[in-house]
């Protein structure tokens, strides 16, 4: 079978072969992604650190299952996401607000709504309000939004990480942008 990601497969094989420094290289390369996913979902820095450690322990234990069919980044992101998700479920923390569930998770094909997130962040005060509004989002929406806009991860990669359908991700992005626009309009009094 041809690997779609030969460099990723080579790194995985180096780790599996216990080559010196290989696992450390893997951790170094993907710890930022792991932290972003876990911290955005969990928000408690102590829990996030512990869950990131759990993620890399799980990656080490299950790396033999990685086949190179997706990017290692997506595979590790999926492990981090699953661990954070289980943590939230264990703590009974909802991933989305109940009003989001009531909408029936309508799939949106177009995430554009005319809201220019970058233009809305031009001044420092607006940037602070935007950051607070992002932090107030439910864990799933906050995670999807920041993966897409801040980490610049594509919708197909986010789908690999979260296991959500692309349309569902677009729906979460649309709702998140709508909530951010409303929050900015309410706090600044200016239509975003």
Image (cartoon, rainbow, N blue to C red):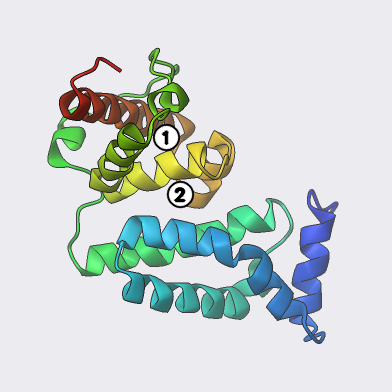
Q: Which numbered disc, 1 or 2, marks the residue that appears first in the sequence?
A: 2
Q: Residue at x 69, y 79 (%)?
A: 24
Relative to 63, residue 89 above or below? above
Compared across the picture, whether 114 is left or right of 88 comes to: right
Which quarter of the picture shows residue 175? top left
Compared across the picture, whether 47 is left or right of 148 comes to: left
Residue 91 at x, y percent in the picture: 20, 68
Which residue is under mark 2? Answer: 162
Which element is circle 1 on? helix
Relative to 187, residue 72 above or below? below
Which element is circle 2 on? helix
Mark 1 Cα shell of 10 Å, populated few (<14), some (14-19), many (≥20): many
Work out which residue is located at the far front of the displayed protein and give it.
124
Which residue is under mark 1? Answer: 169
Which quarter of the picture shows residue 182? top left
Residue 124 at x, y percent in the picture: 37, 36
């Amino acid at each position: 079978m041809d690997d779609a990601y030969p460099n990723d497969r080579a790194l995985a094989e180096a780790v599996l072969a216990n080559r010196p420094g290989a696992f450390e290289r893997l951790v170094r390369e993907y710890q930022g992604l792991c932290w972003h996913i876990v911290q955005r979902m969990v928000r408690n820095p102590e829990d996030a650190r512990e869950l990131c450690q759990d993620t890399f322990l799980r990656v080490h234990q299950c790396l033999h299952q990685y086949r190179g069919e997706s990017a290692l980044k997506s595979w590790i992101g999926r492990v981090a996401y699953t661990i954070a998700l289980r943590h939230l479920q264990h703590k009974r923390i909802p991933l989305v607000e109940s009003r989001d569930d009531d909408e029936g998770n309508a799939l949106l094909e177009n995430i554009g709504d005319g809201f220019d997130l970058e233009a809305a962040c031009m001044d420092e005060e607006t940037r602070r309000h935007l950051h607070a509004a992002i932090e107030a989002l439910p864990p799933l929406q906050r995670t999807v939004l920041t993966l897409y806009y801040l980490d610049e991860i594509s919708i197909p990669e986010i789908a690999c990480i979260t296991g959500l359908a692309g349309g569902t991700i677009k729906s979460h992005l649309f709702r998140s942008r709508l909530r951010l626009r409303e929050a900015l309009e309410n706090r600044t009094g200016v239509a975003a």
